[in-house]
């Protein structure tokens, strides 16, 4: 992991379900991230939802979600 790379973590199935219900969306509506992306956790599989933590210019933590695609 590089210092400039944002933190990527895989959501548990219960967390993924809660996220989809919170935003009232389906898996297919999430932006995609390739399985070959080097930033993904090693145990990521297609269909997993990844939480990405970034900092905005003001230094506040911002969360993004992506679904792993083949």
Image: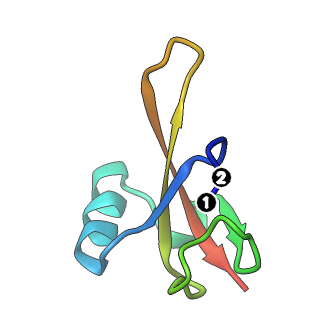
Name which residue lies at 76% across and 79% down. Answer: 36
**Where residue 12 appears, x then y in whole percent?**
30, 76
Residue 42, quarter of the rendered image: bottom right
Residue 14, image quadrant: bottom left
Q: Position of residue 34 (x, y in %)?
A: 74, 73
Task: Please state if 9 lies on the left or on the right of 42 as rendered.
Answer: left
Q: Count numbered badges in the picture.
A: 2
- Which color scheme does this rendered protein use? rainbow
- Please tell me whether mark 1 sits on a helix, a strand or a loop: loop
Q: Secondary structure at mark 2?
A: loop
The residue lying toward the viewer, choosing from 46 and 53, is: 53
Q: Which disc is residue 56 wearing?
A: none
Q: Is residue 26 left or right of residue 37?
A: left
Quarter of the figure with the C terminus: bottom right
Is 44 above or below relative to 67?
below
Residue with the mark numbered 2: 2
Residue 57 in percent (x, y) is at 59, 15
Real-space Cα distance between discs 1 and 2? 4 Å
Q: Are marks 1 and 2 in contact (CB under 8 Å)?
A: yes
Mark 1, residue position: 1
**Neighbour class for label 2 at 10 Å: few (<14), some, many (≥20)?**
few
Left or right of 16? Residue 31 is: right
Which residue is more in the foreground, 49 or 4? 4
Q: Nearer the viewer, residue 6 or 11?
A: 6
Q: Residue at x 30, y 79 (%)?
A: 13
Residue at 32% from the left image edge and 59% from the top image edge:
19
Residue 56 pos. (x, y %): 56, 23
- Identify whether 68 is placed above or below 4: below
- In the displayed structure, would residue 47 be above or below residue 16? below
Q: Residue furthest top?
A: 58
Quadrant of the rendering where the N terminus is positioned: bottom right
Q: Residues within 10 Å of mark 1 (few under 14, many from 20)?
A: few
């Amino acid at each position: 992991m590089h210092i400039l790379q944002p933190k990527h973590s895989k959501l548990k199935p219960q967390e993924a379900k809660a996220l989809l219900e919170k935003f009232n969306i389906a898996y297919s509506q999430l932006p995609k991230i390739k399985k070959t992306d080097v930033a993904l956790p090693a145990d990521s599989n297609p269909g997993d939802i990844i939480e990405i933590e970034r900092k905005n210019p003001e230094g506040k933590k911002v969360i993004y979600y992506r679904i792993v695609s083949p």
